[in-house]
Image: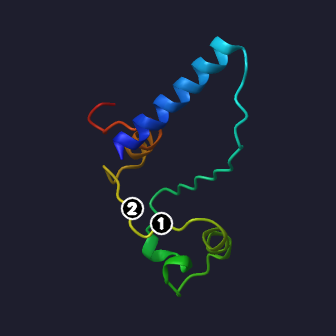
Amino acid sequence: MEFRIRCCAALLSFLGSYATLSGQVPNLRKLNLVLVTIDTLRADRLGCYGYSRIETPNLDQLAKQGVLFENAVTHTPLTAPSHASLFTGLYPTVH
């Protein structure tokens, strides 16, 4: 995963350098990204993951129309360092 993040960072850096050096901005397709993070919410307590004792219609609809990850892990079960790792690509011990 860290390798993939570094590759994306290198690509973005290259594109920024290209735009600066050539005076042109490459024609890139704009992508939409929605990142939903909720503190202390377990996947096994959401309808989109099969839990039927609570209704989560908005998250269920978002999962149906978007991407639903069924195998995700975290470096730490704590919100702040987990978010820091998510946004920087670094391990919690680094920040």
Of residues 52 and 62, the one nearer the viewer is: 62
Numbered-mark total? 2
- Dot 1 amino acid type: Phe
Asked whether, in this view, residue 43 is left or right of residue 1, the answer is: right
Looking at the image, do the residues carrying marks 1 and 2 touch, with CB atoms under 8 Å apart? Answer: yes
The residue labelled by disc 2 is 72
Residue 9 in the image, given as x and y percentages of width and height: 48, 32
Helix, strand or loop status at disc 1? loop
Q: Name the image colouring.
A: rainbow
Q: Position of residue 64 (x, y in %)?
A: 63, 74
Q: Residue 39 placed where, x, y %? A: 48, 56
Q: Amino acid at mark 2?
A: Ala
Q: State the image coordinates of residue 38 (x, y, percent, origin top left).
A: 52, 57
Specify the quadrant of the image occupied by residue 48. bottom right
Residue on which the image places disc 1:
69
| Residue under the point 63% across and 53% down | 34
- Report the Cα–Cα distance between label 1 and label 2: 6 Å
Image quadrant where residue 60 sits = bottom right
Other-residue count near label 1 (Cα within 10 Å), few / some / many at <14 / 14–19 / ≥20:
few
Q: Using the image as rendered, state which of residue 50 and residue 22 is in the foreground.
A: 22
Q: Residues within 10 Å of mark 2 (few under 14, many from 20)?
A: few
Quick check: 48 above or below 14?
Answer: below
